[in-house]
Structures are given as C-alpha cells and as structure tokens.
Image (cartoon, coloured by chain):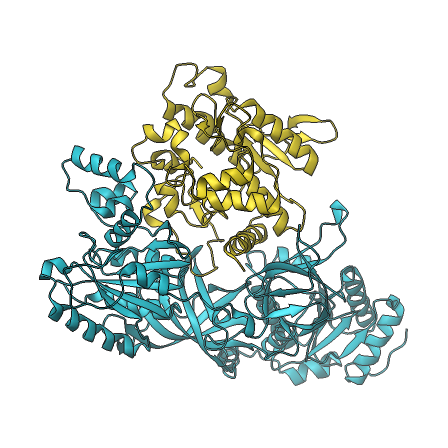
C-alpha cells in the first residue's frame, strides 16, 4: 500500500468506528476540499452511501459559488444536508463586514456560536427536503454526540496536537492540556452525558495529500480552487470578507499538485490567506478552545 | 513513516525536531523569522523548540505538554515526526504519540546523563512494539564535545536496553541547538564516524506489512443499506494481518460460526478478488450467519487465535484512579469490547530501575505491571509474540482510556471469578425449614430452570409463544410453574442493568431462587451463546437447567436438550417440549 492508500484506510477505519459508537453522529461540511474529501471517504467507508447528516454552518458571507456547489452536490448524491446559523448576530448586524465587531468576534459569533447551538439542537436546523426541493426546519432537535470534522494537523499549531477522537465538555470547551490517550487504533468512544466528541479522520493528511487524493479518485471540487483566467485562485475557502485568493495560474488539479510539490507554494502555509489567524497570536488556539473547528 | 522523539524532560526533544525542520528547509516561509521576532519582542532568547511548542501554555512554561505532529520530507520519503512530552505528568501523551510510531529517537542530555524518564520511555517504547531505536546524545556542546562522556552514556544505556531485549540501531552525538550532526556532519566531533540524524532517519526500515501472518479481520460493523436499495449485507473492518480471497472459508470467533467469502467490497475501485493487511474493506458472505460487531473473522485453514476469557498481560496505567480488583472495566481489543476484571497483580515494575515489586494490591498511575485479567466472556486474540496487533488491549475506566497493554499468555478459566462466587454463595446459602426433597414430594415434581432460545431474525415471538404454552400446560396440570417475560425482567429487576453480561448474571441468580423454591421456572433469552448458557447453568447450581432452541442457534459446542423448527406450529412444538419433560422425568405422562 502506498502512502495515500494507507491514509485512506486509516480514515475509513476512524469513520466506521465513529459510525459504530455514536448514535447521534453528524459530519461537518464546510464545502472546502478537505470536507469534500471527507465526504468521499464516508462513501468509501459505507460502500457508496452517506448514512449520516452533513451539517453546514452558514455565515451568509460565504463565497456564493460555495453555496451553489453545496446544493448541487446534495441533490446529486441525495445527501442528508442540514445547515445552521446565528440568526441573532445576523439580524443585529453583529458582524465584521457590517463594521460592528472585529474579525475574531465575528468568527466566534457566526461560526463557533452557530456551530455550538446547531450541534446542541437549541437553534433551528434547516434540512434539505429532496422531494420539496427546498430547505425546511428540521424536526430533529437531538444534540449530536459525535461530530466528524475535516481538520488537518499540518494546518496550524493547535491542530497538530489534536486527537483523532477529541472530547468537548458541556460548554463545548477543549482542554488542550488534558487530552485523552489514544493507544494504537483505540480511541475515546465513551463519553459522559452532555459532552460530545469531535472526530478527526484527516488529521494525518497534508494539503498535498488532499489534492493527490482528489486527483486519484477524480473527486468533484468547486472551481474556486482553480485559476479561471484571472491569474488567481482560492487555496483555502471561507467567508469572502476575510479570505483572499492567492496568485496562481494552476488551471487543473495536476497543476495545483505541482505548485505544492515543488512550485511556488512548497513552503507557504495554506491558511496564509486567512486574516483571522493573524489576529490571533496563538494561531487559532483561542478560537479553537472556544469550539471553532 | 511515523517517528516519535522521546526522552527525559528538558533533554531537548523539541529542539532536535525544530533544528531538523529548519536545517532541511521544511518550515513554512517566514515561520523561523516570525518566531525569532516574537522572542525578541518578549526579550526571550530564541529556541528552536518554540517552532514546535505551538500552544500558548507550552511557550510560557517552556515544556511540551502534548504530542505534536510535524510533517517533514527528505529526498527519500515523507515523515510525520511526533514530538512527545518528557514530563512524567504528560506520560499518557507521550504514549499516545509513541503508539503511532514505527521508530523512536531517544534523546539523552550529555550533561545530565541517563535520567528516570530516559529509562521509562525506553521501556515503554519496547512495550509499544517499536523495535527501531536511535539514541541521540544531545547538548554535547555543554561537555565540550567530549568523546568520553558520549561513550559512557552509550555503554550504560546499551546495557539498559539489552535487558529489555532492545538493540539500538545507533548512538549519535549531537548538539541540536548548534546543529551538530543533525543535517550535516559536525567538525566538533571528529571522533564520530557514524551518520547524522538525517542519515539515520532515512536508513530506518519501513515496517514489514503483516501479509505473511495468519489472516485476522476484526468485524467492526455489519452494514445493510436496504432503504437505499442496496441488498448487500456487508461485514466491514480493517484487515489486521494476512490476506484473503474470494471463495476462502472463514470462521468467526468466539462464536465459531462458519461461512465463505462471496465477494470483496469497496467503493470506486475495480472489482476486487482479494484483500490484505492494512486494507479497510468489506466482505459479503455466501451464507447468512448471525454475527455481531466485535467478532474476529479468520481463515478456517489458518493458525487459529486463542479463545479464552483469562489472560496474562503487561500493562501500563495512565488512569487518574488506580487499577484495582473487583471493579468492572471496559476492555477493548481490536473491534471487540467487553467487561473485564483484574484478577491478580503478578508484579509491578519500576520502569526506571527495572526492579519489580510483587506485593502491590493496586496498579497506580504511571506504573507498568504484569497482571491477570478475566473478561466477562471468551474473547479471540493472539499473543503479542504471534500477531502483534491482535495482542494489544486497552482498558477504559469511567469513559476514559486508562491503560494499555500487550497479551503475553492465554490462561485457562478453570478457576473463574464466577466459580469462586458460586462456591462462596453456596457455602453461605441459608436454608429454610423445608428441604428440597420435601418440596418435591409435596409438589409432585422436581424443580427446573427451562430456557427457550433461538437466534434467527423474526423468531422472537415464536419462542415466547412456545414458552408460554408450556407454562400454561404445566399449570393446568397442577405443576408449580412460572413464566418470566423478558420485558418484565428488563423493566423490573434488571432496570438498572448495564449490559447483557449483567442481564445474564441476574437471570441466573433469580433462577437459583426460583428453583430452590421447588418451582419450574421458564424464561426466554434471545441468541444465547455457549458461554452464556454455561453461566446460567453455573448460577442455577445445584439445580438443573434445560435449554430448548427454536430455529438456528448461536451454539457451537453446547448441546441443547431439544431442538424445534421455526416452522413447527405451537401445538407441534409443545408436543416436543412435553416429550422432553417426560424424558427428563419432570412429568410422568402428558395429554394434550
């Protein structure tokens, strides 16, 4: 088995472990390349099926093509797609683009808070109804006890210390100093009532591995990642006010791989286009302790 | 390839990695400058370790708290380097980091020499099954690059590792801070002829894929996505060792059920004929067998694993509370989970001195101990010396993984915890004024525990119907008889029962009381296995048990007293039951 095959097998093992152990399991889908690989790995694990809900946190500042791509793929693969949001912050314009809060607070409100309350079921969840072809309020308000997230250890410092199965306490907090042990292929699958576990099947993948896998499996990704003639492309997707495209002429997946392997991005961090990281001197740690992905 | 860097606190593990990343141009652009600038701003001397100790707490305390992964690439291959903390408080994080590694770099401070955790980590590395160890004697600048210091540490530590049967690949003299012998040979150590850290890294051997070992496939789950028009019944999991092909005969353990591989299933790949070690895969079987997740699928012609509920293991304990006897823990071995109890502590090892203490009553945090465990039911495993990954266990205490270990020996369960319990119970059983013989004479029949079972989907209702019909017949014919329904039991006496093992235990104890009162006690238990019926039998002692099965059964060796077809009418079934009761001399004659 080569490296990519080993990574795939390990991720599939983790996904199956999560599916077996967590009754209320969901997968976060940010629409980016990592969570799309995660979706593909779920199809590998469950032999073509995706037997769990995909949860998207909509900040309403996502690049519009991302939402189109999300809805199209949901229809095509008949996905059980659910989205959540922070209605209060959006209504009261407590956002960075509205000029009322700084970037970190905006991230905390539109992402961390929305995520926390969507997972717990306290705030409305909207489920895509395939028959009606529209989003309806989800009847299911049960908290998700297992949440699959596509973070990678190579993205930044605090993510490099994550566990594959990482507990969050009742307040959604991450206790970085006291994480559970993980021996061999045994993970933390037992958890106290009221707590939940984040599951990270992509922890050992690098950005390059992700693109190599997308290429090998021919996984459909949004064209935002490619140069469409303007000499720029997105390397990492997020909200448009805080995410800048990078200068690149990579027009297909092979060219992206080349850029990462030996080209211009060989030693440039992926999240360099993300403004909120720079505002947090501890990397993403402050945000992540509060429940950010 | 995954590499772990271990050693005593402050011996410079993070610095070694930081320097390795910096000297091989593996850092993100600007990272080195950024960390240097932060240090200058806070008037702190720059350290390479800061590159790794990314978490805020770590930078302020200057120690590594958790294992971090670093992605690193040489001309030869890709690496994930795991920086493990050296502080004793974070031993569980060190073990977590090391458990995913194929080789270990053990760092020893030349000036401080071999310390407690140099030894403890060396021991744990060997326990975790890492057989490639490279020792880095660090901070050589502090002893003026003295060959004598290096040689002395080399000699002492080699002797220590030899006791653990570990043969280190090499010892490298380094000063990570100055980059001596990290990526380039140092002029300061002209007496050293070996390779640099980078050379040693690339010289490590990739772990041999366990394809030549017996086939082991822990069943992680059984999938059927009928709602999505998929009729495949897929046995899913990851192949731990060996290989298998379509048409091979397989046995599931511990149930001993057999079938044949009908197909190898995977998504978005060309049709597969075979599967081998490392693959996360699925199979369909040619016959419908009733198995549960946690069973071990093996090739029927391969060397069989051990099947036993007692075993001896070497364990390391990282739980907050000590490991004690008479407490229930959760045992995980590959895909299997069950309840386990500590039976005996053979000895507790002081990992830093390799001396043993044999009279401890509990295993404390950070202890390494040789212990005997007993699982609540037989489990399938291999000794760690046969198939390494199938001899690895973890123990969960109160939601947390508290210990891990390796199985050294399979023990017979001659003197099980249950047998001991029953001996004690019977010894102290307080008899009433009426003897069993007197009851038998008065009631006109013997007491009996009759269990109806079956394992086929959709037969549950049938099994209950027959059991109730038997109760009705016996009652009408003046027998002292009582049928206990499953839901009455579950909602009542078993309402706080946590698992099936406890369910079986309570039922057995209840049967002991009913049969002691001279009655015929009838109940149903769905999908009984050999070991469960043996338990019921033991618990009901000294009275007798009859087992009647409807349709397919989960039994392997156990011989049931009567076998009914699921297609029998209740009338025909009850006839067979009554003829059995007559044969067993519980009733004299019967009329329907």
Is B284 in front, or is A187?
Answer: B284
Q: Is residue B213 left or right of residue A283?
A: right
> Residue B158, located in which quarter of the rendered image?
bottom left
Is B70 in front, or is B377?
Answer: B70
Q: Which chain is yellow?
A: A
Q: Is residue A199 left or right of residue A19?
A: left
Q: Is residue B537 left or right of residue B97?
A: right
Q: Is residue A12 left or right of residue B88?
A: right
Q: Give the percent coordinates (x, y) of residue A92.
A: 46, 15
Name the residue at 41% across, 45% down: A153
**Which color has been applied to chain B in this rendered view?**
cyan
Relative to B187, say whether A274 is above or below.
above
In which quadrant will I find the C terminus of chain B?
bottom right
Is B8 in front, or is B419?
Answer: B8
> Residue A265, located in which quarter of the rendered image?
top left
Relative to B135, say whether B440 is above or below.
below
Q: Give the percent coordinates (x, y) of residue A220.
A: 62, 37
Q: Give the percent coordinates (x, y) of residue B406.
A: 43, 71
Q: Give the percent coordinates (x, y) of residue A1.
A: 54, 60
Name the residue at 46% across, 26% down: A245
Relative to A212, say whether B395 is above or below.
below
Name the residue at 44% across, 26% down: A243
Q: Is residue B181 visible?
A: yes
Is B329 in front, or is B1?
Answer: B1
In which quadrant will I find the N terminus of chain B?
bottom left
> Residue B41, located in which quarter of the rendered image?
top left
């Amino acid at each position: 088995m080569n490296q990519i095959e080993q990574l795939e097998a390990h991720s599939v093992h983790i996904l199956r472990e999560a599916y077996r152990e967590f009754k209320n399991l969901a997968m976060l889908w940010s629409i980016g390349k990592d969570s799309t690989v995660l979706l593909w790995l779920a199809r590998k694990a469950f032999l073509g099926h995706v037997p769990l809900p995909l949860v998207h946190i909509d900040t309403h500042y996502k690049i519009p093509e991302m939402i189109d791509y999300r809805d199209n793929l949901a229809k095509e693969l008949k996905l059980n797609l659910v989205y959540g949001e922070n209605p209060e912050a959006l209504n009261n314009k407590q956002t960075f683009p509205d000029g009322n809060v700084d970037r970190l607070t905006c991230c905390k409100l539109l992402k961390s808070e929305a995520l926390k309350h969507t997972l717990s079921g306290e705030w409305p969840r909207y489920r895509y109804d395939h028959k009606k072809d529209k989003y309806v309020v989800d009847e299911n308000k049960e908290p998700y006890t297992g949440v699959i997230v596509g973070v990678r250890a190579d993205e930044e410092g605090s993510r490099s210390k994550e566990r594959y199965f990482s507990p969050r306490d009742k307040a959604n907090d991450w206790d970085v100093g006291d994480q559970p042990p993980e021996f061999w292929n045994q993970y933390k699958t037992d958890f106290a009532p009221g707590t939940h576990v984040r599951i990270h099947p992509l922890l050992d993948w690098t950005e390059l591995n992700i693109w190599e896998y997308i290429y090998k499996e021919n996984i459909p990704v949004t064209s935002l990642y490619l140069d469409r003639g303007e000499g720029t492309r997105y390397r990492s997707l997020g909200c448009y006010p805080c995410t800048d495209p990078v200068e690149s002429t990579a027009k297909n997946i092979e060219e992206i791989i080349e850029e990462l392997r030996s080209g211009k991005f060989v030693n440039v961090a992926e999240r360099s286009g993300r403004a909120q990281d720079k505002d947090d001197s501890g990397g993403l740690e402050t945000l992540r302790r509060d429940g950010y992905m | 390839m995954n590499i772990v860097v271990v050693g005593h606190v402050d011996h410079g593990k993070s610095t070694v990695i930081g320097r390795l990343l910096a000297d091989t141009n593996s850092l993100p652009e600007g990272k080195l400058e950024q960390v240097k600038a932060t240090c200058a701003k806070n008037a702190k001397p720059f350290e390479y370790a800061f590159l790794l100790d990314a978490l805020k707490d770590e930078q302020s305390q200057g120690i590594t708290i958790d294992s971090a992964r670093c992605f690193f690439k040489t001309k030869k291959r890709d690496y994930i380097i795991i920086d493990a903390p050296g502080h004793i408080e974070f031993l569980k994080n060190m073990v977590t980091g090391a458990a995913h590694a194929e080789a270990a770099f053990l760092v020893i401070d030349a000036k401080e020499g071999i310390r407690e955790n140099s030894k403890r980590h060396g021991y744990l590395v060997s326990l975790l099954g890492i057989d490639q160890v490279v020792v880095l004697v660090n901070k050589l600048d502090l002893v003026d690059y003295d060959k004598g210091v290096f040689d002395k540490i080399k000699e002492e530590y080699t002797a220590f590792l030899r006791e653990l049967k570990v043969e280190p690949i090499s010892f490298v003299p380094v000063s990570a801070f100055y980059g001596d012998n990290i990526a380039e040979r140092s002029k300061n150590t002209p007496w050293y002829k070996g390779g640099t850290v980078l050379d040693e890294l690339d010289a490590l051997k990739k772990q041999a894929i366990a394809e030549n070992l017996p086939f082991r496939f822990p069943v992680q789950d059984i999938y059927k996505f009928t709602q999505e028009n998929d009729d495949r019944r897929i046995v899913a999991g990851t192949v731990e060792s060996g290989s298998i092909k379509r048409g091979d005969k397989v046995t599931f353990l511990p149930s001993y059920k057999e079938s044949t591989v009908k197909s190898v299933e995977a998504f978005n790949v060309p049709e597969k004929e075979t599967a081998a070690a490392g693959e996360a895969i699925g199979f369909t079987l040619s016959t419908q067998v009733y198995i549960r997740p946690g069973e071990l699928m093996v090739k029927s012609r391969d060397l069989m694993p051990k099947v036993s509920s007692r075993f001896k293991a070497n364990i390391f304990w990282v739980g907050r509370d000590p490991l004690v006897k008479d407490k229930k823990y959760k045992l995980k071995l590959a895909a299997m989970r069950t309840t386990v109890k500590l039976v005996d502590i053979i000895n507790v090892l002081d990992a830093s001195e390799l001396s043993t203490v044999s009279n401890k009553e509990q295993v404390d945090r950070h202890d390494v101990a040789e212990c005997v465990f007993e699982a609540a039911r037989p489990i399938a495993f291999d000794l760690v010396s046969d198939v390494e990954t199938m001899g690895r266990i973890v123990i969960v205490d109160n939601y947390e993984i508290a210990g891990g270990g390796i199985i050294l020996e399979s023990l017979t369960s001659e003197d099980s915890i249950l047998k001991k319990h029953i001996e004690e119970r019977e010894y102290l059983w307080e008899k009433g004024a009426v003897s069993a013989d007197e009851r038998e004479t008065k009631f006109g029949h013997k007491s009996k525990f009759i269990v109806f079972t079956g394992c086929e989907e959709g037969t549950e209702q049938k099994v209950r119907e027959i059991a109730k019909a038997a109760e009705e017949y016996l009652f009408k014919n003046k027998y002292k008889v009582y049928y206990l329904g499953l839901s009455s039991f579950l909602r009542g006496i078993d309402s706080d029962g946590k698992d099936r093992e406890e369910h079986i235990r309570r039922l057995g104890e209840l049967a002991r009381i009913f049969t002691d009162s001279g009655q015929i006690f009838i109940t149903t238990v769905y999908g009984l296995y050999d070991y469960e019926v043996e338990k019921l039998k033991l618990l009901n002692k000294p009275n007798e048990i009859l087992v009647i099965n409807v349709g397919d059964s989960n039994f392997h060796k156990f011989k049931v007293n009567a076998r009914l077809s699921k297609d029998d009418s209740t009338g025909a079934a009850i006839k067979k039951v009554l003829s059995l009761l007559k044969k067993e001399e519980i009733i004299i004659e019967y009329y329907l």
